[in-house]
Every structure is written in structure tokens, then in C-alpha cells.
Image (tube, grey):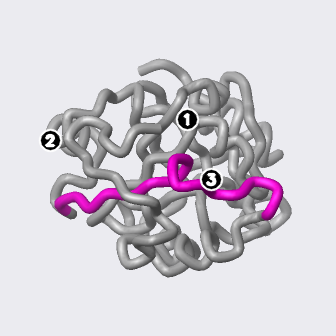
Amino acid sequence: MTNVIGTLKLEPAISRLDLLAAPVAAALEVWPAEAPIDGDQLLVAPISADLADTAAFCEAYDVKLGESANCVIVAGKRGGVTRYAACVVLATTRADVNGSVRRYLDVRKASFAPTEEAVRLTGMEYGGITPIGLPKDWPVLVDARVVATPHVIIGSGVRHSKIAIAGPALGALPGAEVIEGLAREV
């Protein structure tokens, strides 16, 4: 992966833990040995926190929507127990929350987790939530289109930076499951 995507100047994330939320930095420090991080597989760049939202970010930093991925937290209840999942989808798509995600969670109804709840449970900032460093018991559902993308830009756990990662590496995250049709085209 190149160290420049759009106008982002990317550096190895492992050398810039100051640009990551605490749970993300902690996850990188114990990254599984079977999926080692090399300098070109996981990069980070500082951005303006005011431009963290996908559309504004892509326009300001000359990144294509098809290179940008969103991580959304979905919740559903069954038997009085709330089940959570992180869904990683390209910015050109939307997670099929009440279709494939609901069926995966085996709940009657699924919806985006409330903002305050997602922030509290992940330890990350809203608008920067990423699949790296989430609670270990949460499944990470990755749309197959994300894995088929050479590199994607995702949140870093904070609004003032973004991570660039190889699409296939997202499918190899601990707890990740690649799902065909997890998202629908916008």
C-alpha cells in the first residue's frame, strides 16, 4: 500500500499510537502473531476532527467513497439480552441491519446502537469507531466487498485521524466474519 492515498500522508500505525484511541492502540500492541502487521498493511494519518464524517472526509482529502469504509455498531435483543455486532461496509453501501445483520444476531429486530452506548462500550469517539480494538465477544461482520478492496480508509477510534488498511486484513481481524451481502448499494 502506498504511503499516500488522496492527500493523506500515512505512517505506520504502530509508530503513531498517539493518533489512535486507547483500545485501538492496545489491540495493535497484541496483534495476533498469525496476522502480523507490517508497515504497509496498517497505516494512519492525522485529519481535521471536523472532517471525520465520511462524505466531508472523502471530499476534503480526495479519497474515493469506494476506498472508504464505515464501522457501525448494531444491537438487538433476544431473551432480554442485548447482542452487539460491528459491521464494516464500504461508504458506497449501507449495512443491511434488518436483513442479514438481524439474522446473524438471531434477534427479532436490530438497529444501530445508540450513540452514547456505542461510545461507552467501545471506548472510542462517535464518528471514529473502528473494528480494531472492540470488545472481544463482539462479532465483526465484514462485507465481502470490503475484503475485495486493496485498501480502505476506516476510523481510528478518534475523530482526528484515519487508518488505511488492506481490505483482506479486515476480514482476518480477530472475531471477523466475511459476509456476502452484508450491505446494500446506496
SS for callout 3: strand
| Residue 120 visible somewhere in the drawing | no
- Tell me which label, 2 or 3, sits earlier in the chain: 2
Q: Magenta segment, which residues?
A: 33-48
Tell me: residue 55, above or below residue 173. above
Q: Does the magenta segment cover residue 38? A: yes
Of residues 61 and 103, the one nearer the viewer is 61
Q: Residue at x 54, y 59 (%)?
A: 113
The amino acid on which the numbered mark 2 sits, given as a three-letter code, is Ala
Name the amino acid type tagged 3: Ala
Measured from the top left, where is residue 57 in percent x and y? 23, 44
Residue that mark 2 sits on: 60
List x then y, in percent, for residue 135: 68, 71
Secondary element at image label 1: strand
- Say above or below: 89 vs 10: above
Tell me: 85 left or right of 55. right
Image mark for residue 95: 1
User: What secondary structure do most residues of the magenta stretch adopt?
Assistant: loop
Q: Position of residue 14 (x, y in %)?
A: 51, 68
Q: Secondary structure at mark 2?
A: helix
Give the Cα distance between marks 2 and 3: 26 Å
User: Mark 1 or 2 closer to N-term?
Assistant: 2
Look at mark 3 in the image and give the residue it sits on: 86
Q: Is residue 158 left or right of residue 93?
A: left
